[in-house]
Amino acid sequence: MTSKKSLLLLLPLFLAAVLLVTSTASGQSGTSSALAGTVVDSTGASLVGAKITATDIQTSAVRTGATDSVGHYLLSQVNPGTYQVSVASSGFGVAVSEATAVGVGRTVTLNFTLSVGSASQMTAFIPVEGMSCGSCAATVKRTLKAISGVTEAEVSLEQRGVKVRYLESKVAPEQMAAAINQAGYKAGTPRPER
């Protein structure tokens, strides 16, 4: 009888230990990788509220953020991978980084200098695979029109792609391609058009 009482007393301690180990292990499944940097204008002045968009090149996953009151940004807890980072700010052009590898537990610093630009409208054609019906075309168009800076999206099933008019100071073609990929289609490399 004494051994049963001992087991009943030890059971709650055992369960508590199991829960502690499980919660600690699941808490370690995240990543401490990050993208960070500073955004300034051509005079070196900090740009507050610049839009930061990091796109994982392999998965097309997108992380967004903005610069703080001194022009710094931090995208923490990013998954390891290869990222392309674009920066846009009202009244300035868009800057896009080269493909940059982010390793496990690493913080990669990417600083940007934006030059003054107008809100000029650009046009790009983005090839789209897997778009075969009117419903698909409507989804691609709706996805693009939801992006700040996209002014028009003309989807063509014949040409298997979409012609997009956008404000280059607000959005980069790579961001639009990433959004198409997230919608379940395969976007090709955007081509500028005149």
Image: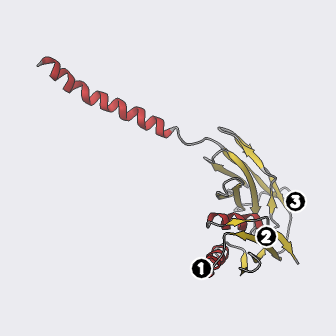
Q: Is disc 2 surrounded by few (<14), some (14 to 19) or many (20+) residues within 10 Å? A: many
Q: Which residue is depicted at the point 66% across and 69% down?
A: 130
Contact check, label 1 and label 2, Cβ < 8 Å: no
Q: Quadrant of residue 136?
A: bottom right
Front: mark 2 or 3: 2
Q: Which residue is depicted at the point 79% across and 70% down?
A: 169
In the rendered image, residue 177, in percent from the top left (x then y), is placed at: 72, 66
**Residue 103 numbered tag:** none
Counting labels gives 3
In the rendered image, residue 78, in percent from the top left (x then y), is placed at: 63, 48
Q: Quadrant of residue 132?
A: bottom right
Mark 1–mark 3 distance (CA, rounded to whole Å): 45 Å
Mark 1–mark 2 distance (CA, rounded to whole Å): 30 Å
Counting residues from the N terminus, which is met first, the one under dot 1 or under dot 3? 3
Q: Amino acid at mark 1?
A: Ser
**Residue 42 numbered tag:** 3
Q: Amino acid at mark 2?
A: Ser
